[in-house]
Image (cartoon, rainbow, N blue to C red):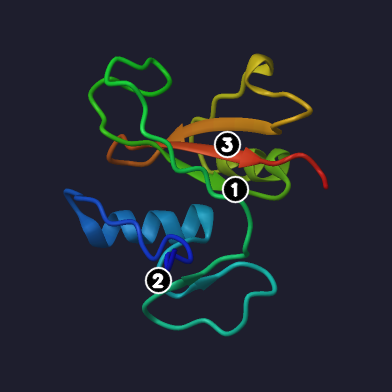
Amino acid sequence: MGVLGIGGLFFRAQDPDALSAWYREHLGIGAGCAADDTGPVDEWSWNTQGGPVVFAPFKADTDYFAADKQFMINLRVADLAGLVSTLTAAGIAVETRDEWNSPEVGHFARLHDPEGNAIELWEPPAA
C-alpha cells in the first residue's frame, strides 16, 4: 500500500492562531516545530520522530474521552513526568491515573487545550 504515515491533522478552532500558539508554546508542536534529531525546521510543518501511531475509531458511546467531542489527540512523548511538571507549572490541568499505565503499553496523562479538545500524552515503554 502507498500510505507512509499521517501527513496532517486538521480540525476546526474558534481562534486558530491562538490555539496554534498554545500548542507551540506548551507542547512544541505545530508549524515551525521539530522533535529532537529530525532535521531543520520549516514554516509549514512539524517534523516528528518516527514511531508507532495508533489509528483507531472508537464506538460512538465510548467513555474513553468526552461524549461531546469527535476525537482525542494522542501525542507520543519522552519524559512524561517532566512534561507533566512543565505543564502544571504553566497552570495547565493534567490528569494522571495509575490504572491507565501498564508495563506493556506505557504511561499516560490527559489534558485539554484552551478550546476543550482532549489530548492524551503517551510515553511508550522503553525499548
User: Looking at the image, is 15 positioned above or below residue 71?
Assistant: below
Marker disc for residue 88? 3
Q: Amino acid at mark 1?
A: Arg
Q: Amino acid at mark 2?
A: Ala
Residue 7 position in % (x across, y down): 39, 66
The kind of secondary structure element at disc 3 is helix
The one nearer the camera, 108 or 102, is 102
Label 2: how many Cα within 10 Å (few below 14, some 14–19, many 20+): some
The residue that mark 2 highlights is: 31
Q: Image check: 40 left or right of 6? A: right
Q: Earlier in the sequence, mark 2 or mark 3?
A: 2
Real-space Cα separation, disc 1 to disc 2, in angstroms: 17 Å
The one nearer the camera, 20 or 40, is 40
Q: Residue at x 72, y 38 (%)?
A: 81
User: Looking at the image, is 88 positioned above or below residue 3?
Assistant: above
Real-space Cα separation, disc 2 to disc 3, in angstroms: 24 Å
The kind of secondary structure element at disc 2 is loop
Between circles 1 and 2, the one closer to the viewer is 1
Task: State the image quarter where residue 121 is shown.
Answer: top right
The residue that mark 1 highlights is: 76
User: Looking at the image, is 17 positioned above or below residue 117?
Assistant: below
Q: Amino acid at mark 3?
A: Thr
Q: Residue at x 30, y 34 (%)?
A: 116
